[in-house]
């Protein structure tokens, strides 16, 4: 079956609703290309109009992108809000000269989604105006567009370096620079060569909205014989606004230093505490020795007298 004969649920069709089951014209099929709409992207929408009544002429098919109030088949009025789509180098109204009985005709619309649009399902009322035997008629229906903005995640660390032979804290920063929100986000640390994870290796972040970030901390002990760079593999799992599951892998590369190297590069400050203590001890010992010697000399001097 050709793809244009399929109803592409992922991009556009959650449902088509008609106001009058007895109408001569109706929307029998909806397709979109591409099959997934991103904010700021274009989409070609194709509606197949079917005539189940007498010959229809002067047909006009219009998308109510600015919202509308229409009457449903049960007689109730339904109000539809404006949608974040606009015509792209075309009109939101297309015309058909005629459709004979039991025939179909396609009409196409080129739309573009607003770049700041949120993910969601957007219902668009469709008006179909036509004439049968010079009598004007109008039918209405509703199609649904699914706008799915994907999260775009990146992982980094502001940890300057790791010190061999001791425990280290690695700050992990996760940024969502995409147009969609992520949900149920978690981070799993994998096995690390020449290092051992201390405590938890899995961290739950939760929701991470677009243009936002969050942080977590991983503690690990770096072996004294480790290489100059430690590779930390991370797996990030989350769902998008449509509850579609995603799993992405990242690697953090962080340099590892010996204590002396860490001091030389300024990662840790040199401690002078032990030197100061030693100097104080030497001064005290020298003073004690001085007092002892001075006492001995005084006693000898008295004996000589």
Image (cartoon, rainbow, N blue to C red):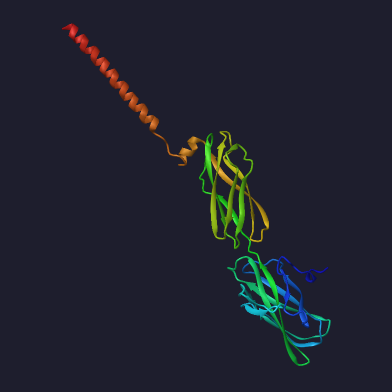
Residue 87 spot, x, y in % from top left = 64, 77
Extreme bottom residue here?
134
Extreme left residue here?
305
Q: Residue at x 19, y 10 (%)?
A: 301
**Viewer-closest of 39 and 18:** 18
Residue 136 spot, x, y in % from top left = 73, 90
Residue 275 spot, x, y in % from top left = 38, 30
Q: Is residue 18 left or right of residue 113?
A: right
Asked where in the image residue 239 lies, by quadrant, the reply is bottom right
**Viewer-closest of 22 and 2:** 22
Q: Residue at x 81, y 87 (%)?
A: 55
**Viewer-closest of 279 and 109:** 109
Asked where in the image residue 191 lies, by quadrant, the reply is top right
Residue 196 spot, x, y in % from top left = 59, 37
Give the number of marks: 0
Asked where in the image residue 220 lies, by quadrant, the reply is top right
Q: Is residue 118 left or right of residue 4?
A: left
């Amino acid at each position: 079956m050709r793809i244009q004969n399929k109803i592409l649920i992922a991009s556009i069709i959650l449902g088509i609703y008609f106001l009058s089951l007895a109408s001569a014209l109706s929307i029998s099929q909806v397709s979109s290309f591409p099959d997934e709409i991103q904010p700021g992207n274009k989409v070609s929408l194709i509606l197949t109009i079917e005539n189940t009544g007498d010959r229809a002429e002067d047909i006009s098919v219009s998308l109510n992108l600015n919202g509308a109030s229409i009457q449903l088949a049960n007689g109730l009025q339904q109000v539809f809000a404006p949608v974040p789509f606009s015509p792209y180098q075309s009109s939101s109204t297309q015309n058909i000269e005629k459709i004979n009985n039991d025939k179909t005709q396609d009409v196409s619309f080129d739309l573009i989604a607003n770049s700041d649009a949120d993910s969601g399902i957007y219902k668009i009322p469709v008006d179909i105006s036509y004439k049968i035997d010079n009598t004007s008629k109008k039918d209405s229906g509703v199609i649904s567009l699914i706008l799915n903005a994907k999260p775009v995640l990146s992982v980094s660390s502001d940890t300057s370096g790791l010190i061999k032979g001791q425990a280290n804290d690695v700050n992990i920063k996760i940024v969502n620079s995409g147009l969609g929100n992520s949900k149920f986000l978690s981070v799993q640390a994998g096995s690390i060569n020449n290092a051992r994870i201390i405590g938890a290796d899995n961290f739950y972040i939760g929701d991470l909205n677009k243009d936002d970030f969050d942080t977590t901390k991983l503690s690990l002990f770096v072996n004294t014989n480790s290489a100059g760079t430690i590779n930390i593999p991370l797996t990030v799992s989350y769902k998008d606004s449509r509850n579609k599951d995603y799993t992405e892998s990242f690697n953090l590369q962080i340099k590892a230093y010996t204590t002396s190297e860490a001091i030389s590069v300024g990662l840790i400050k040199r401690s002078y505490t032990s030197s100061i203590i030693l100097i104080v001890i030497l001064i005290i010992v020298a003073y004690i020795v001085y007092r002892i010697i001075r006492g001995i000399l005084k006693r000898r001097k008295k004996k000589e007298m």
